[in-house]
Image (tube, grey):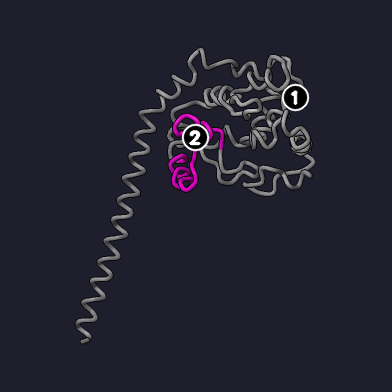
Amino acid sequence: MSNATKVVQRHKVRRAILFAVSLFVAIVLAYCASVLITAYIDTPKVVAVATAPDRIKLQVKDVSPEFQQILLTVEDPAFYTHHGVDLSTPGAGWTTITQGLVKIYFYNGFTPGTFRYRKFGQSLIALVFNSRVDKQTQLLMFINSAYFGSPDGEDVVGFSDAAKVYFHKDFSELTRDEFVSLVAMLVGPNLYNVKQQPQKNQERVGRINRLLSGQCKPTGLSDVYYEACR
């Protein structure tokens, strides 16, 4: 094979690679644009459904400032400052409250094999959602849509129903320890279920209380189990 032929072939390979890369970039950009535009259009509809009177059993004002602080410290420490996605705050995990709402209202769950793909889309939607929905409304949606397992075969959704199912009380009657027990469930509603796994729940409650008292700190973004708080 002559040198000229080799040069021509190398140019063809480079052009093919450049075309493939350009096509991939174009597809990714088109996907991102589609997700962002759709999220922008759908967000007001989602909020209208989620905040309909029949869906709201608790108002934000029904959750005391102390309880709100406990919830956010555990679930989303940078809730009031991030833009929907948080990739740096220790203990925040990979899902903010905003991303959690996106997962609930924009998806029907993440099936095996689609997690990474959907996580990327979830994050894009969260950025749009956060820009269109104020934090108080997001918090309102979360306290009424958080999932608390299915101890008796039926899903328990929202703090109001969780208080009744697990403690046979109205939310306003919960003690601090009982509220922390519910917050402890959020990372794994069935794994740390108050009814089904009381010992595991209380062990996590202990870690959370040590975190809240300042005795320990998360060791990194993904340390949602507070290994230093054992």
Q: Quadrant of the N terminus?
A: bottom left
Instruction: List the residue tagged with mark 2.
Output: 103
162 vs 44, left or right, is right
Q: Residue at x 32, y 55 (%)?
A: 24
Residue type (three-letter) at the residue carrying disc 2: Lys
Work out whether 87 lies above or below 146. Answer: below
Residue reaching furthest to the bottom: 2
Q: Pick the residue in front: 137 or 198.
A: 198
Q: Are marks 2 and 1 in contact (CB under 8 Å)?
A: no
Q: Is residue 97 magenta?
A: yes
The quadrant holding residue 170 is top right
Q: Quadrant of residue 225?
A: top right
In magenta, the rendered stretch is 96-123
Helix, strand, or loop for circle 1? helix
Name which residue type carries label 1: Glu
Q: CA distance from mark 2 to mark 1?
A: 27 Å
In the image: residue 155, left or right of residue 37: right
Residue 85: where, in percent of width, then height?
52, 40
When the figure is inspected, residue 168 is found, relative to residue 205, above or below; the finding is above
| Residue behind mark 1 | 178
Picture coordinates of residue 71 (x, y %)? 66, 30
Q: Residue furthest top?
A: 53
Magenta region's main secondary structure? helix
